[in-house]
Image (cartoon, rainbow, N blue to C red):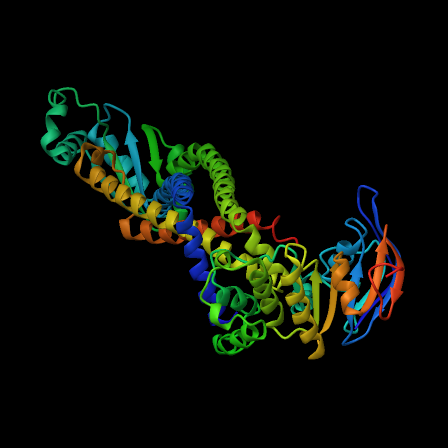
Amino acid sequence: MKLRTTKYFAKEGFNNLSRNKVMSAASITSVIAALLVIGIFFIIMLNIDYAASALESQIEMMVYLDEGLSEETISVMRDEIKSINGVKDILFISKDTALKDMQKKLGDNAYLLEGLESDNPLPNTFIITLKNPQDASSVSLALSSMANIEKVSYGKEDLEKLLKATYVLRMASLLVIVILLFISIFIISNTIKLTVFARRREIGIMKFVGATDWFVRGPFVIEGMLLGVIGGIAATALLGAGYYYCINLVRDQMIGILSITLMPFKQVTMSMTALLLCVGLVIGTIGSLLSVRRFIKV
Amino acid sequence: MIELTNVSKTFQDGHKALNDINMFIDRGEFVFIVGQSGSGKSTLIKLLMKELEPTSGKIVVDGKNITKLKRREIPYLRRSMGVVFQDFRLLQDKTVYENVAFAMQVTEASAREIRRQVPIALSMVGLSKKSGLYPKQLSGGEQQRVSMARAMVNGPSLLIADEPTGNLDPEMSWDIVKMLNEFNQRGTTIIMATHDREIVNGMKKRVIAIENGDIIRDEKRGGYCNEA
């Protein structure tokens, strides 16, 4: 395409946008709304995957022991576990140490645990370090045949639970995203239809003096792209600010004790910006093409 | 230049606009197509512009069978012909100059070409001094002249005029037709659909009369009616 044609498209596209200010604003708003929801689901998905891979690569297993075991039994178990193939190291954490750790972790909120010293609910625990994460299931199998163990928990197990729990969420959000995409395309296409309609005489004249379909479409496609991209930029900015706030919230507030770690800001915003701008661009383009289709057939 | 072979057009509602038309128009001719409203004149012109498809038959323009033209080739067919309509079809928010330049812009002509060709086209129709005015500041005849400049600016070998004098008073109508005649003398083939009896009788050009979709008369130097 020639440079002057590109210039002409850009100029006319911007003109179209400003000619219909109210409708343009309305459709940008709805694009923002749609992209916000898409972006929120996307961030949730990213964080689930982030947590999943963190769990997957975890090479520690927690072995919670039954109540009231003698020190002797514990020491025998320790040797037994250490001899299991794939175990690299084993560390014993007593009930008391576990409680103190937790108090330390809570800091100012430690008063929550007051009174628990006499009736400590936390179990004695072995923390096993694995030689590599793949050994988790075989080690866990070996542990399951041992007595005096209340529960074994490790990354892979949590991961499976997490994936199962989020399956419905993933499917639902996919559905919502698809519906929202269609709605945004529809809204953009309707907005542009107004400009197309206002300029139908001009389109007719263009056609009979020999303009190609692409030449007629150009400005409207630019208009659609602008609607989509402006919506995309606004949605990205809003979501970025929101996510930044969430990260700080999780870090500063009590939620921290739930040991949630969110994906780093930079990583999230980079992929989110790319996604939302692309989606905005695509829905803008599709919307505009749909709206010109009828009028161009002369 | 233009050849129609057994061309028929029946609309979807069953209305027969043209029945088995055969016609040959040579390069450099000036042809009037006359007939009542609804006789099929406009349909014929729309077929030539490929705004409509014939139901059957073959249409050749400038050596090309346009019935077989692909959709994306239509713009190039239209660039080879200028078209003038009864209602001028000018853009009201563009000046005279811009209206004429617009026809070149859409063909992606360079700014330099546009700057060179538009003034030539405007001087051909005698509107050089009014290039900065808007259509509504002009008389009907002047507006039609703008549309003629627009039709000629890309240097077409064929000019099709569909009732170009339909909205004009007799004096202005003569201006327009004389201008068409000038274009013709410079080598442009002219096809003018009209039901303006005086002009047809006065010009003594070839006349093709259409009635109810049939060619009822084709005379080398004819008048509007047989008796004339």
Q: Position of residue A220 (x, y in %)?
A: 50, 54
Residue at 16% over, 33% down: A102
Q: Quadrant of residue A252?
A: top left
Residue B37 or A202: which is nearer the viewer? B37
Above or below, A89 against A174 in this view is below
Q: Position of residue B70 (x, y in %)?
A: 72, 63
Instruction: Please provide percent x and percent y for residue B64.
Output: 78, 71
- Say whether residue A155 is left or right of residue A185: left
Q: Is residue A253 visible?
A: yes
Which quadrant is home to the C terminus of chain A?
Answer: bottom right
- Placement of A119 over or under A178, stated as above or below: above
- Nearer to the camera, A284 or B16: B16
Seen in the picture, residue A129 relative to A203 is either above or below; the reply is above
Q: Is residue B162 left or right of residue A250?
A: right
Q: Give the vertical position of A277 relative to A74 (above or below).
A: below
Q: Residue at x 14, y 33 (%)?
A: A106
Residue B157 in sight in this render: no
Label tally: 0
Q: Residue at x 54, y 70 (%)?
A: B108
From the viewer's perspective, tell me whether residue A219 is left or right of residue A212. Answer: left
Q: Residue at x 78, y 58 (%)?
A: B44
- Which percent across, then down, holds residue A254? 19, 32
- Picture quarter containing residue A113? top left
